[in-house]
Image (cartoon, rainbow, N blue to C red):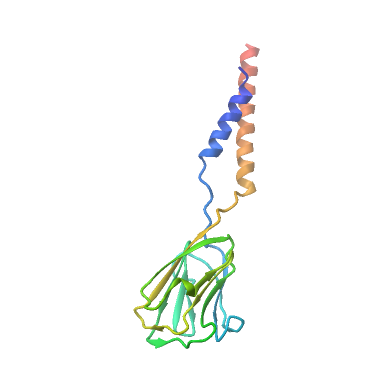
Amino acid sequence: MTLFPTLFRLTLLVCAALPAAKASLIGDVLRIDHYYPHAANLYEAHTTVVAAGTSDLTVLLGAYTVNPEAHAFHVSFNYAAPWTNSAFNGLVISGIDHAVTGVSVTTNFAGWDSSRLTYSADSISARWGGLSFDSSHYFIFTITQQEAVPTPEAAATLWLLAGSLAGAAGLRRRLRFDR
């Protein structure tokens, strides 16, 4: 029995056992913007690098805050007021690195429905227009993303491991025949 097919099978088993890389927002550079009175009019713009915790907290219009996390955006409101009803009055988050494949919303906002949310591969939009808010209101936009592609370094490490195993097996075999 030759050793190479056995080592090759072992390497494949090790590769299959490695966890798939999960996409995360941590480290992404995002645009967190408010548009009003329509989707083509940028009213207030911010750029942030996503980090765990609240160091990346963004305040928009003094009315609400957005805290991006690894897989969600937490939005909270600072005081009570109505949003002017217009073609678009709301939040747009863009620059998401790994393709967004779904968004689920948790909120206590009366009048919110899914028609107010849109998303694409790299952005999420939420229309607040016509709704009223107070400091007890919140949104949590939880996103699912396309899995991250394994880095070339991971593949190279696996090939290096396989080569080392093959070399060690060859050395062992040579030492066995030299006796």
In the picture, measured across the screen, residue 72 lies left or right of residue 47, that is left
For the point 41% across and 76% down, the residue is: 112
Identify the image quadrant of the C terminus: top right
Q: Give above or below for 52 relative to 14.
A: below
For the point 58% across and 80% down, the residue is: 39
How far across and how far down the image is residue 11, in percent?
A: 58, 33
Q: Nearer the viewer, residue 36 or 160?
A: 36
Q: Quadrant of residue 27?
A: bottom right
For the point 39% across and 82% down, the residue is: 78
Q: Nearer the viewer, residue 56 or 77?
A: 77
Q: Give above or below for 129 relative to 115.
A: below
Identify the image quadrant of the N terminus: top right
How far across and how far down the image is residue 65, in percent?
A: 45, 77
How far across and how far down the image is residue 47, in percent?
A: 57, 74
Q: How many marks?
A: 0
In the picture, measured across the screen, residue 82 lies left or right of residue 40, that is left
Q: Give above or below for 23 relative to 105.
A: above
Residue lying farthest to the left in this orientation: 136
Residue lying farthest to the top in this orientation: 179
How far across and how far down the image is residue 91, in percent?
A: 51, 77
For the point 41% across and 72% down, the residue is: 139
Q: Quadrant of residue 77?
A: bottom left
